[in-house]
Image: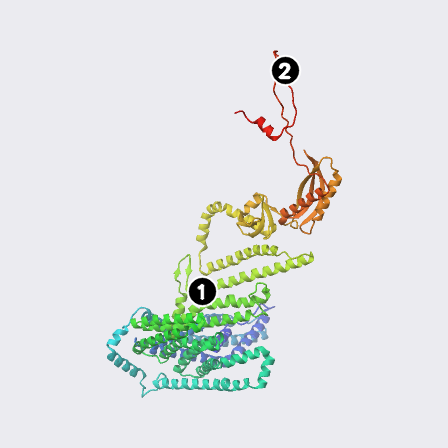
Amino acid sequence: MSKRTVLSIILLFMLLLPSRAVLKERDIAGTLAMLRIELTNYHTSLERQSGYLKEQQQQVMKQLVDALNKSQQNALMLYSQKNGYVFDLTYACHEATEQYREFKQNALPFRTFVNNADIEISRYDSLINDLSTMYTAALSTRSKIDRNVCLTLAVNIRHTLNDNRTQIQQYIDLYNTTESRLKYLNDYANKRYSDIQNSIFSNRGENYFSILRQIKEQVKETSQTIIDKYKPQQKYHSDWDSRIIIGLLIMIFIVGFLASGINYISIGLVITWLMKREKAEQALNWVLGSKRSIEARNYFKDKRWCIIMTATVITFALILGIVRITWTQNFIIMACSLLVGYAWLLGVILFSLLIRLNSEQIKYGYRIYAPIILVCFTVITFRIILAPNDFVNLTFPPILLGATVWQWLAISRCNRKLPASDAGYAYISLVVFLASDAASLAGYTLLAVELLIWWTMQLTCILTITCLSNMLKKYANNPKRQFFNADTPVSRVWFFMLIYKVILPSMSAVSLLLAIYWAADVFNLSDTTWHIFNEPLINTTKITLSILRVEQVIILYYVFSYLNHTAINAMRYHLTNKEKRRAASENRKPNDQSVISQAAMWRNVVQVLVWGIWLLTAMTIFNINNTWLVAISAGLSTGIGFAMKDILENIYYGISLMTGRIKVGDFISIEGTRGTVKSISYVSTTIEALDGSVMAFQNAQLFSKNYKNLTRNHGNEMAIIPVGVAYGTNAAFARQIIAGAVKSVERHNYIKFVQVVFAGFGDNSIDFKILSWVDSRKQIYAESDIMEAVYNALNDNHIEIPFPQRDIHIVDGGAAFTGGDKPAARQHVDHAMTIDEAMQKIKPAE
């Protein structure tokens, strides 16, 4: 039904709505006066629109009658189809199911109208009864007049509502009849659709070798079938007569010739002539610039014929589209729809070749894609003329074999002269041809047709996406844009990345289903295909899985991947600018390592949030029941908690480290090992030691072993170097010499002298300690420079640096008793001996 009819019925429904209610006034006279005003307004409105409503009621009735007649026409067409005419049968089934779908989509709430009308009639019956039995003796003359007028108006309104209700009831009866007929027809069409699917994918016809063995009989039978189908009827001129088909072919030839002539004259002659004119050259230079103007003219010159062919196909599609809109003949409408679709597919392929290939490669591109294009046109022709199955089974296998050989020859001659992507598509086309050959020879001719149509649609989608991708890459890699550069602000690239990372991948994911849908539409099986896409492959209380649901989750993956990438880049850009502003305010260089560390932490947080939301959304789409997940998680939580205790502890400390305690690039010390932090993850921290070795510490170890961050104090640490001088040296003079020596090697961010302090009295020297700030990363070299400078300074000033010495004194213990009880006095001989003498003394007796 038309939208105008729907609006008319809605307007009629609004007139059946209750009029404005009368509230309790000051007295009965006031109430009657207000009731008279309301009823008068409502009655006037009904009278004013009664003529318009009658006209609209007639239109509604006509729409319902037309729908009923069309359903009867579709029924006769559908019930009369033979099994050997698949294209005819699919067209009839499509018309029946499409009419039922449109009828249900535009269904009107007639029953609601009747229910509301019954309520209104009942209300006015009560009002009339009340006004009729009202006690009037106590009313004033004015109130009696108002009461009589209200009664008259209520009776008239009640009659009008009852007439409208009766009219709507007639609509309901006709609507129910039409709906019942369409539903039965739709059910029958869906059953025949199932038969068609069975014939395509399950029921194998007679294989082609059997047909060849009976070629004479098959040709004779096919010829008779064609004569019976296309022979003109003398008594009645059918819309599907062979004369109409011949007229369509003539029209296609004329439209093609007209489109070619228009584009050859406009592009091949006029624009080419203008390109040679000096004024046109100046205009191009002014619009594009000198360099780009030359490139544009050379591009047009090299690809002029390809441009003419592409424009011709587009013009052909536009003219046929206009014919389809303006024509009323059913066969012409159906044929133009198919041809327009095919022309747009061909135009997309030609435009992709025009954009991606150079002038030398284009002709080879035409050659490798020509077989699949012409075979697809053959299938479209079969579909337009509604070719009988016998004719298709007899003629299509040889056509496929010829196209397969043609495709192989095109690949062998043009493969090396084309980009790898086009060569790959050509090989896939060859594989599809071979599979179609096998199917058609085995008797599955309709399956072979469906397979070829699918690949043509899929190839069109692939070439479209490839063309768009190449154009976007060329646009993004412009030196003025550099959208793929990591340093480009996210505010400049977010929209481009939305197209490149979401829309293009989503188009790739959708293209497979879209190609299957378009291929099925050639047999008018699009509704059935859509039903298959929606049909749950797995449908339980715990999960619901269908092709469209999987497709939705895949597309959402690309969306959330884009959100994750954009959020991380935005956060990194924010942290970088923040660090630059802070460094500028503190008059220092920006700390890139600090930015990297913070960005790593926020990247992890963003990834958890984004992918967590994606996972929850996917679970919702698949109708995954959370009850069993909760039950399982409750049972496993305790065990997992104990098993993951150390992991969770490391993750906790890892988050603590990422908040800023340690950053990537910091120089730390742990258990005597010094090194630079290279990475911080949730579990471990990787350090590159000074000797070049790489070590990984668990995050919990860093806290338990009391690591030292040597970068936080501006990267310096206090070096305490002991030094001693001989007893008798002037302490103040020695300290002055040592301090001067340290200051002589003092450099910014390397060594900064602090003080020399008297440390104590040693065994062999008086001890000092040198206090200096040194670079943590160069501690060994800084201490070496300090000690070397101090040593040289003390030597230059003849200050002795004592070292431990020990004199060995040998006691001669020869004790003798000379005749008495008391031992003789021990005599000590203290004399120095050489090392050799001492060794001889202590050498054990042999």
What residue is drawn where x is 42% and y is 74%? 102
Image spot of residue 788 (x, y percent): 67, 45
Q: Secondary structure at mark 1?
A: helix
Front residue of 651/335: it is: 651
Q: Which numbered tag is attached to residue 551?
A: 1
Disc 1 crowd, CA 10 A, few/some/many (<14, 14-19, 20+):
some
What's the CA distance linking mark 1 and mark 2? 116 Å
Of pointers 1 and 2, the one earlier in the residue sequence? 1
Q: Residue at the far top: name it.
A: 820
Task: Say which of 763 and 494 sits in front.
Answer: 763
Tell me which residue sits at (71%, 47%) in the image. Answer: 743
Of the residues tagged 1 and 2, which is closer to the observer? 2
The quadrant of the image that shows the N terminus is: bottom left
Image coords of residue 643 (percent x, y): 47, 46
Colour treatment of the image: rainbow
Q: Quadrant of residue 547 in the image? A: bottom left
Residue 428, given in percent of the width and then of the height, sits at 39, 70
> What amino acid is found at the position of numbered circle 2 in the picture?
Ala
In the displayed structure, 257 sits above or below 489; it is below
The residue that mark 2 highlights is: 824
Rendering quarter of residue 72: bottom left
Work out whether 551 lies above or below 235: above
Mark 1 in CB contact with mark 2 (< 8 angstroms) = no
